[in-house]
Image: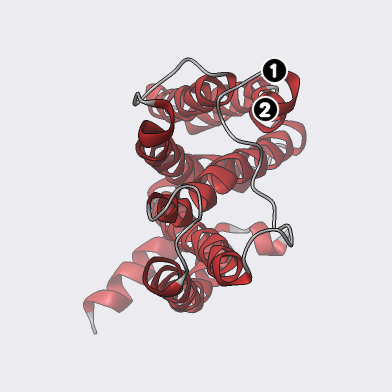
Amino acid sequence: HQLAAPPRLYQICGRLVPWLAAAGIIALATGWVRGFGFAPADYQQGESYRIMYLHVPAAIWSMGIYAAMAVAAFTGLVWQMKMASLAVAAMAPVGAVYTFIALVTGAAWGKPMWGTWWVWDARLTSELVLLFLYAGVIALWHAFDDRKMAGRAAGILVLVGVVNLPVIHYSVEWWNTLHQGSTRMQQSIDPAMRSPLRWAIAGFLLLFMTLALMRMRNLILLMEKRRPWVSELILKRGHR
């Protein structure tokens, strides 16, 4: 449990953030420059398909982040690890933003295809439910002054909401929906389109990790603000 000790975890997060941020910027820049600037137009959707380089990574990681939160929530509830509960709180805002991006870009992408910004499609509706789940987790975390109680309440909601993930993923197979099938890296996709998408997906993951670790550091400081090591850290920074 030494790695889970707040001072040690704070240091580890601080060391990782610059490297993850740099890698994320490179990956996103590579994916977006190639995707928006050099990838060929789609034979059916023309230029409008390029929103895929925002929508698909955001949609993938909106679910991936929630799955990671579920693992952290389970760990926090079963083994009473405070840092696991903090990880849930650190990841939730990033997941909420990614889900919002997925919904907005999905609406913009679907407008030319469906003739409307929104339909109560199974995939869209379950993704909207995911946004509400993220909002609920964030609200519960801030609803209690007792961090242990807040972590427990948020963790329970996360685990209850896990049932929504397979609904999102398999909705296009279980029901007749307007939403296209899940995006996979099939050989049918032009390599000039597929490669930038992979870069964008990697970039969104690295961006999430960067933002989550930055928030984790802030939450650790708030939780440990009365500890001697935090006071020493503040004094060291003050002397720089």
Residue marked by disc 2:
172
Instruction: From this view, report whether residue 64 is shown above or below residue 145.
Output: below
Residue 175's tag is 1
Q: Amino acid at mark 2?
A: Val
| Residue 173 occupies quadrant | top right
Instruction: From this view, report whether residue 26 is shown above or below residue 141.
Output: below
Q: Quadrant of the C terminus?
A: bottom left
Specify whether 200 is left or right of 60.
Answer: left
List the single residue furthest toward the top. 120
Q: Quadrant of the N terminus?
A: bottom right
Q: Residues within 10 Å of mark 2 (few under 14, many from 20)?
A: some
Q: Residue at x 47, y 24 (%)?
A: 128
| Residue 110 occupies quadrant | top left
Q: How many marks?
A: 2
Q: Amino acid at mark 1?
A: Trp
Asked whether the residues under the numbered discs 1 and 2 touch, taking CB atoms below 8 Å apart as contact, a structural biologist would say yes
Instruction: From this view, report whether residue 180 is shown above or below residue 123.
Output: below
Q: Residue at x 42, y 60 (%)?
A: 214
Specify whether 134 is left or right of 163.
Answer: left
Q: Nearer the viewer, residue 22 or 77?
A: 22
Is residue 13 visible in the rendered image? The answer is: yes
Specify whether 47 is left or right of 148.
Answer: left
Query: Can you give x and y, in whole percent of width and height, for residue 2 in the image?
Result: 70, 63
Assign a secondary structure to mark 1.
loop
Is residue 162 visible in the rendered image? The answer is: no
Q: Nearer the viewer, residue 52 or 71?
A: 52
| Residue 217 occupies quadrant | bottom left
Query: Can you give x and y, in whole percent of width and height, for residue 68 in the image?
Result: 65, 45
Instruction: From this view, report whether residue 84 is shown above or below residue 38.
Output: above
Query: Can you give x and y, in whole percent of width and height, for residue 67 in the image?
Result: 66, 40
